[in-house]
Structures are given as structure tokens and as C-alpha cells.
Amino acid sequence: MNREQILGVLYDLALTIGGEIKVDALLEKTLQRLLFHTAWPAAVVLDEPQDSEFGVSVRLEMAVGDHRLGEHVGSRFNCPVGLLGPLVEVLDNPLLLQPLSQDQGYAWGLRLPVDAQCTILLLSPLPPSTDLPLQELFQPVLANLAKALLLCRNNEHLTSLAGDRDDARAELAVALSQSERERAYLDCLHDTIPDLVWVKDPEGVYLSCNRVFSRFYNAPESEIVGRTDYDFASKELADFFRDHDRAAMAAGKPSMNEEWLNFGDGSHQGLYETVKTPMHDRDGHLVGILGVARDITERRRVEEALRASETELARHRQHLESLVAERTSELAKAYARLEQTQFAMDRVGIGMNWVDAEGRFTYVNQVAAQMLGYTVEEMLTLSVPDIDPGFPAEEFVERTEEMRRVGSVRLDSQRRHRDGYLIPVSLDIFYRPETDGEPARYITFVNDISERKRAEQELREAKEAAEQATRAKSAFLANMSHEIRTPMNAILGSVYQIRRGGVPPGLGEPLDRIEAAGQHLLGIIDDILDLSKIEAGRLELEEAPLMLSRLMNEVAEMLSGRASDKGLAVHVESTVLPGLLLGDATRIRQALINYANNAIKFTERGTIRLRARVVEEDEHSVVVRLEVVDTGIGIEPEAVARLFTPFEQADSSTTRKYGGTGLGLAITRHLAHLMGGEANVESRPGEGSTFWISMRLKRGSSAAAPSAAQAAGAAIEDRLIAGHAGTRILLVEDDPINCEVAQMLLEDVGLAVDLARDGTQAVDKVEGNDYALVLMDMQMPRMDGLEATRRIRRLAGRQKLPILAMTANAFAEDREQCFAAGMNDFVSKPVNPALLYTALLRWLDAGIS
């Protein structure tokens, strides 16, 4: 809407406001003119707001355009928060307008606050379609309406009081009212003008100004009137304004200039065209200067843009023909490239087709057609559901919804050859939405992936074969471990029994060699099993309380005998270590023993040192580095890199001096990685080596501290004899030698032993006798130990009978199978008498309690 239309609206409203002297007539005509100019369908007047315990209530004073609301005029209703307010505002919340929605549901409202008591609301069910600047236009109109409303109320009040007064006073009141209305009209017109308007006297003192000018100096009219430009602007700017005032007065006619103005409230900066006109009274005397300033910033920008566009247009005209020629050449080249691309795609075997929104082919290249045994013409008569089982005709739109949403997809599918068989293909599909003159389509690139699918099938078969080989290897290792541990149990058990019975002179050394060789063989077996578990990813660490200082002292004590035999000293050196940590003490001890055994093996004289220090720590964990330092032969630099590789040694020649399998260091590094650390060596030939391992261990609480062993060695045997001599237990073992060794170990601590040669005998004996405990082998003829345990658990009263596995099956899954079958504990072969007696004491004591 242009400026003249806005002034017409304001003029009409000013005439309406100034033409009535009664409140009802003033409000009714004002509402009618507002609805006329804004095209809103209905309007109401709300007044007399009152606070109550339910919020604010208002009275419906008047309604226009809605007869149902007209029936409720004079009634009060509770007003939602936000319906009333001090500012002109468009309301778009239907909940605020719900009390006014009777037959018609109103969703939009224009709030026009007149004064503290009266508010006009324009109502509409639809968004307003007027292009009037509603909020800026009606603010000054409302101020004048408030003044006119006050005059009408006062006039009605005076009229009611002065009914018996003379006509002169009545006429005077009317004249005064008319004068005030005219004044209100002039004020409305003055404030509605969107330009800056002001009046000064000949001395430059302001006599009046409109609302827009007040924004320029960021002060109300009352503070501007009576003051000069020097009170608001810099002296330089004030002199500029004053010089133009004098020029206009001297010329005796309007003068015009352009100037950049910055509004004092910071809301605007622009280029203004200022017209200053001298004002004279009827006698021709100069009474002041009328100033009007109009914002021409946009107009100037348009003018400059127009000049620039004309220059640009001329330049474009000059180059138009050359651009057309150049574009024509580019199109020719592009078409040639397209032909080359099509040629290349045909040669490399890439199929391409276009599919419309219903799945019909609109373009197919030669490769895509030949891939399925069709001609291009035949393919163009088909649709995607005809050749692809993955896109049924009735579900094509649904199956392609995701493609339309994301724009492109890559997927594998199958397409049916005209001979009936399916061909695996890879599809790259790009969705091109509909544009002006171009329908939506799917652009698809097709590759025959038959060879890839065959390769994938071969890979799966190879993977299954490898997994089968791994399972076979695990089964072989488990069987090998069982077959070696079973006779080794007999050998080491017999040595133990011979030592307990007293060693004749000359037999001590042979027995030591037998026992050392047996333990060495067991160590090799354990290393092979550990490496197998690591490679299969099945080596798990436990998390139990431990004290590093105690553990290092235990390792030193274990090694002191071997070290002293070679004349070496073993020392433990450690800084202040955390008292209690959580970790796998067995695996940490294994790593230290691996290092220390090597140190003793490769050191002829000097000292073996076990060291520990904290590398890093926080409130939850610590990183600890453990070191074994020797003064041995050292290692060549080129050998260090391969030391921690399985089956590798620094010297692997057939003439080497030192033996070993080369597994210990590899296992140690794997253990370090499992514990969040690293393992390595620092060495110089002839100066010794420092093997180290780091690990991250959690901090433990005092409640989890490991309790000291209650008894060891002979003390445990004494407790077994004292507490359980004569107790009857069942030994289930099929190997005669192992059976004899185990029976001797059990009878040595006073236990009464019954024998069963397989699982079937064991079930029968347990069913017919009350045993305090059962020692169960796993691999036996007729019925193995797992099935025997399961059947025993099903016998009446045998659910809590302690059953301990005593077997050469040493894998973790063997232990899990035992527990799953219902066994209570696990003792591996070769049997360590101390560990066996400890387990027996624990479970026999538990049975008594």
C-alpha cells in the first residue's frame, strides 16, 4: 500500500473519531471503519478489566459483525493471560480467542489497546489478507481515539449534569468539544505523517514536532518544544541545520537539500530530502519555519541500481553474441563428451537405464539390455517389476520411498534374464525430482556382480574351513594336553609319594631331575595352551585383590633356589606402591617368572633385580611398570625386534647354548596388552638386559583385601587329619596308576576312599552310599564325568554333595563345562598335593557347617 492510501485511511479514521460526541456512536462507527479498511470480519470492545481470584475479567461492551457475540454484550468473562496488553499486536493463538468464539472459531486477532480501561479486538478465523502496516498504522490513531473517547465521556457526563442549564452553556460545551475534536484530528494527522515534520520560530526554537521527529532526537515532543538543535546535536550539525533555516527564510520560499540523518534511538540511518518552508501570518509577518524530511535512501539506491543495471545491460549486449557462440560451442563439446561417456560405459560393461515414477523404463543403454538378453527396444516395453523380483508392481512406490527421501542409494539385487535365471547385480540409483517440463525419474547404473558373488561364496567357504581348522586345532591341543597330563600326573605323583616315604641315598638327584623335567614339560604345555587361547581370543583375565609388593616377594622366594644354585642373588627393589589393587595375580606372576627364569638362564654372575614403579595414576586406577634386570650376556639389537614373536629366540641355531621354546615372551606381551599395557626389553650386549611389562590396574578397597592363607603345607594336612580322618569319599578315575597315586594322597590325610572306574559305577555308588565328597575325572569309558555329575544331581538328596573335578582337561571351557554340569570345584592334573588338600579341606569343612 502506498503513502497516499495510508494517508486516506488515517484521514477517514480521523474524521470518524472527530465526528461523534457520544461514546456508543463513536465506538460503533470506529469499529465499522476499522473492519472496512482491514477486511477483518468482526470486532469487539472490551472494557472495565477487574482482578478476581480466577484472573482478570472484562465486560463485553460492544460487538460488530458477529450477532452471537452481540447477544452477550454487557456480560463479563474471564480473560486468558495475553489477550490484553499495552501494545498493538497481531494474535495468532486460537486459545487466547476461545472465549470470543461462539458460532465462529476465531484463530487470529488484532489487539488495539485504546486506554487502560478499553481495548478493541479485531477477529478473524483466517490469517489477515490486508497489506496495511497494522501495528505502525493504528498506534497514533488509538491515541487520538483515547482523547476523543475521554471527551465523549466527559461530554455525556456534563450533558447529564447540565440538562437544566441554559442553551448558551450547552452551545459552549459543544463548541469546546468540537474544538477538542478538531485538535485531536490535527494531532492525529500530524503524528500519522510518516515523514519528519517540525516547526521552529525564526530564532530556531522548536514549536512542535511529530512522533517520527521525536525518534530522530530520541526525546518526546514535550522535551523538544522550547529548545534548539544545539541542545540535541553537535555544534557542527546544529550550525548546518541553522544555516539552511536562514537560507529558507532569506529566500522567502521553500528550499530543499539532502542530508544523512542518524536517529537518536539507533533504529535507523538514511539519506533524507529536507524541504524547509517559511511560515507567515495573515499580515505577512514571518512566524517560523516548517520543515519536512522524507527518507529517500531506498529511492536513491534504486536510482543507482538502475544506472548500474543500464551500464551492465549495455555490457551484456556487447558480449551477448560472443556468449551465445561460446555456449553453442560448449554444448557441442558436451554432446561429444556425452557420446564418448556412453561409448566408454558400453565398453566397460556398465548398464544404465532411466525409470519413471511408475517403474517403466524410459531409457536403456545397450549394455543394460544385453545383460538380460533383450534388445533396447524390447527393454523399453518392460518395467522394473518385470525383471526385478525385489520390486513387485503393487509395492513399487512403497519400496522406492527411501530413494526419493535420501536422493540416492546403492544396493545389491537380482535381475531376471529373459531365459528365466537370476543375475546378481549392483545398483547405483539416483532420484531426480520433477522439474519444469521434466518428469521425475530414477537414473540407475547397473553392474553385473556375478564374479564378485562367486568370490564372496569362496571366501565364506574358506572362512568356514579356517574355523573348522581352528576347532580341530583346539580339539587336538585339548586331547594332547589330556594325554600328556595324565601320565605326568602319575610320574609327579609317584615322585611325591617317594619323597614322603623317605628318599634313599643316591636317589635324591634322580628324583629332582625327574620332577624338574616333568615341570618343564608342563610349562611347555601350559605355554602352548595359553598361546592357543590368545590366538582364539578366549584368554580372559580375572579381577581379584592383590598386593604387588607381596607378589614380587613371592616370585623372588620362588626363584631364590634356582638363583642360589648358580651363585646369583635376587633382590626386590620398589618405590612406594599402592597398597591394594585389582588384577589377575596369576598372570602377573606368570609374566614376572617368564622374565626372571630367562634372567637366571642367561646370567652367569651378578644379581637379578625385580623392580616396580608407578608410571601414571588417577583416582580410579594406576599404571605400574614391573622390571626384571639382570647382569647377563645381553641381546644384539637385531635380535630384540623378534624376541616377542612366538617361537622366536635371540639364538635359534642348532649350536645354541640355551634352550627354550620361544613362547614365554610372546605370551607376556599378549598379557600386557590384555591388561592395558606393553612389554619390551632394553639391552646391550655384554651389559645385561632389562625386561619390563606395564599394566593398568584398578584401585581396590580395603573390604576386598585378600585374606592371608590360614594354613599351608603340613598345616593343611594336619587340619584334614584332625577334622576329617575316617571321612568316606568317592574317587572316580579310570587310569590305574593315577588312581593309585590319588588314593595314596587321600589316604595319607586319613580319608577313607572308595573307587569307581567310570561314570556308571560312580552313579551307582553315590546312589547306594552317603559320601562326604566326590573326586570326578572327566574322560572315562562308558560314561564321562560330566554326564555322571548330571545324573548324580538328579538323585534324591544329592543336590548339595560336593563334587570336585580332578582332570587333565585344562582348558577354560573344560572348567566351564564342569561347573555347568553341576561340579563345585576344579583341580587340574598333574595334581599339586597342596592345592588338592586345600580344596578338600574347604569343601569338607563346608559340608560339616
Image (spheres, grey):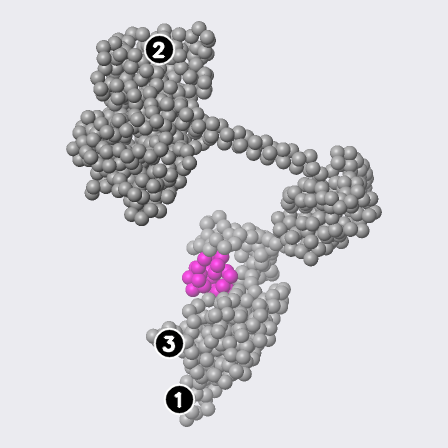
Total numbered circles: 3
Instruction: Tell me the amino acid under the disc marked 3.
Output: Gln
**Residue 794 rendering spot, x and y as whole percentages:** 35, 47
Label 1 close to label 3 by CB (< 8 Å): no
| CA distance for labels 2 and 3 | 102 Å
From the image, which quarter does the N terminus lie in? bottom right
Location of residue 560 by image quarter = top left
Depth check: give the residue in front, 126 or 222: 126
Q: Where does label 2 land, which residue?
A: 602
Q: Which residue is mark 1?
A: 161
Residue 449 shows in the view? yes
Q: Is residue 677 visible?
A: no
Q: Residue furthest left?
A: 722
Dot 3 lies on which element? strand
Q: Which residue is drawn at the image coordinates 43% and 32% (left, top)?
A: 538
- Image coords of residue 807 (percent x, y): 36, 31
Query: Magenta residues?
Result: 201-227
Query: Closest to the observer: 774 or 119?
Result: 774
> Left of 54 or right of it: where is 702?
left
Q: Is residue 619 magenta?
A: no
Q: Residue drawn at (44%, 75%), measured in percent from left and top?
A: 118
Mark 1 neighbour density, 10 Å: few (under 14) some (14–19) many (20 or more): few
Q: Residue at x 80, y 51 (%)?
A: 381
Comparing labels 2 and 1, the label whose residue is closer to the camera? 2
- Residue 416 falls left or right of residue 96: right
Mark 1 vs mark 3: in front:
3
